[in-house]
Amino acid sequence: MRRLGEYILFLKKMFSNREPLTTYVRLFFQECINIGINSLFLVGFVSLFVGAVIALQMAYNIVSPLLPKYIIGLATREMMILEMAPTLSAIVFAGKVGSQIAGGIGTMRITEQIDALEVMGINSASYLVLPKILAGMTMLPLLAILSAALGIWGGYLATIFGNLSPTEDYIYGIQNTFVPFEVPFAIIKAFVFGFIVTSISAFKGYNVKGGALEVGKASTDAVTASCIAILAADFILADTLLS
Amino acid sequence: MIEIKNVGKSFQGKEVLMDISATFEKGKTNMIIGASGTGKSVLLKTIVGLFSPDKGSVLYDGRDFHRSSIKEQKIIRGEIGMLFQGSALFDSLTVAENVRFPLNIHSDLSESEKDDKVNFYLKRVGLENAAHKMPSEISGGMQKRVGIARAIVMNSQYLFCDEPNSGLDPQTAWMIDQLIHEITQEYNLTTVIVSHDMNSVMEIGEYIMFMYRGLKIWEGTKDEILDAEPKELQDFLFSNKLVRTFKGI
């Protein structure tokens, strides 16, 4: 509970006595490149294969001749949009970006770079963390959209190369009984996960005390805490928005 | 001039600073000395506002820093420059960008004026040829000089140095000491240096304050320090061979 209180105070600190908004514009775009564009390949690669594997496993499980083949496409779409794209992207994001944020800010803490910012009269929490959080909340939804598209495409490729079903069935499956709300639902989830990963990782890095060993531990803790928070938030959002 | 009045600070019930008062005059190299763990760095961080004192006050030319509004504190911070023990240069910025950083935050100068100022101060610390290098590409002594340039680029009135020559060879340490001393006199700064290096004290110390276990035990000049009476100070001083040589013992 104490850590939670510290986390809330840390978030509050970012908005009190912050720098002029113009200061953050350049930093925001820089962070979008750092944490968003640089995650493109990994998220894309993982999503493509996850979509392909979902299609393969669905085909493997359809043993009854009464079950239509288009279910492969339908299940791939549902799993990718509802769960895999936002949640898996967030977990990959936590592993790659979360550890990078915690490590980077933690190193700045132990090498007194954060103290240097404070002595210059800069709100270090706001200056260092706010652009990262805003970039995370912007880029993760975009990555999730890309992830869903690539996952569904991965399933399509698996259908072709694995000869799982006629491609027309797969295309029919991904269109059949589509609920448009699932897309904004996935985007909302990714938006929340983006906040969770960046803020928790920054909090862990910002509060590092000690040396290089503690920075490494903060990076690991950031990933662990982010993953737990993502899964908890995933359940709460699904329960709240889909019920 | 900086005055600290009855400053006290505790961490988790342990008193680290006890009722410390001192006056650091303008144009002088003021030094806070003492063994490791005596509260020197905590005192320095309290003076520059990184820690809030539990009691007492810190006055910058009469302005009570810790009781000022955030806006007033920001004005005072604009007049403060600090050289950290490990230089604390921003890893992702070049030498010139590091020096330029405070100007980007606090100054309304045009880009070319900022460039001129950065070049002037880099030249002042003898690093005009290292402007485009990254901090990781230069030596520890050069990093300290960049730290000094960054600390004074805003026309600072107050310069704080936390163990400025730690980790440096004696010749480079001497050079850094001399640079700080010259800059203090050249720009009429109020300079406060935390150190446990007696070579620095004997070279550039004009006002010296000795701390022991969170208390101010003694204050005076480098001419008086060798004859100072407190046993704690004597023990500290005469553990150094150079000082024993000075004293002839």
Image: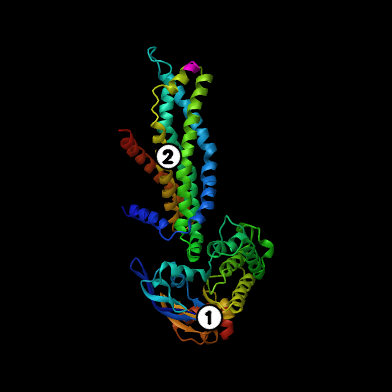
Q: Are marks 2 and 1 in contact (CB under 8 Å)?
A: no
Image mark 2: chain: A
- State the residue in front, A16 or B8: A16
Q: What distance separates the C-alpha of mark 2 from that of mark 1? A: 56 Å
In the rendered image, the vertical position of residue A143 relative to residue B77, given as above or below: above
| Residue A149 visible at all | yes
Q: Secondary structure at mark 1?
A: loop
Q: Residues within 10 Å of mark 2 (few under 14, many from 20)?
A: many
Q: What residue sits 51% from the left and 69% below the top? A: B78
The percent position of residue B128, horizontal first and vertical second, equals 68, 65
Q: Nearer the viewer, residue A24 or B25?
A: A24
Mark 2, secondary structure of its residue: helix
| Chain where mark 1 sits | B
Q: Magenta part of the protein: which range? A: A164-168
Q: How is the image coloured?
A: rainbow
Q: Is residue A166 magenta?
A: yes
Q: Is residue A164 visible?
A: no
What x and y, as percent, mark residue B51? 42, 67
Give residue B70's position: percent from left, percent from top: 42, 67
Q: What residue would you read off at disc 1? A: B26
Q: Position of residue A177 (x, y in %)?
A: 38, 23
Main SS, magenta residues: loop
Please say whether residue A120 is one of the residues in the magenta stretch: no
- Going by the picture, which residue comes out furthest to the right? B129
Asked whether, in this view, residue A7 is left or right of residue A39, the answer is left
Picture quarter containing residue A12? bottom left
Q: Amino acid at mark 1?
A: Lys
Identity, as a three-letter code, of the amino acid under mark 2: Ala
Q: Locate the C terminus of chain A and report the quarter of the image it occupies.
A: top left
State the residue position of label 2: A190
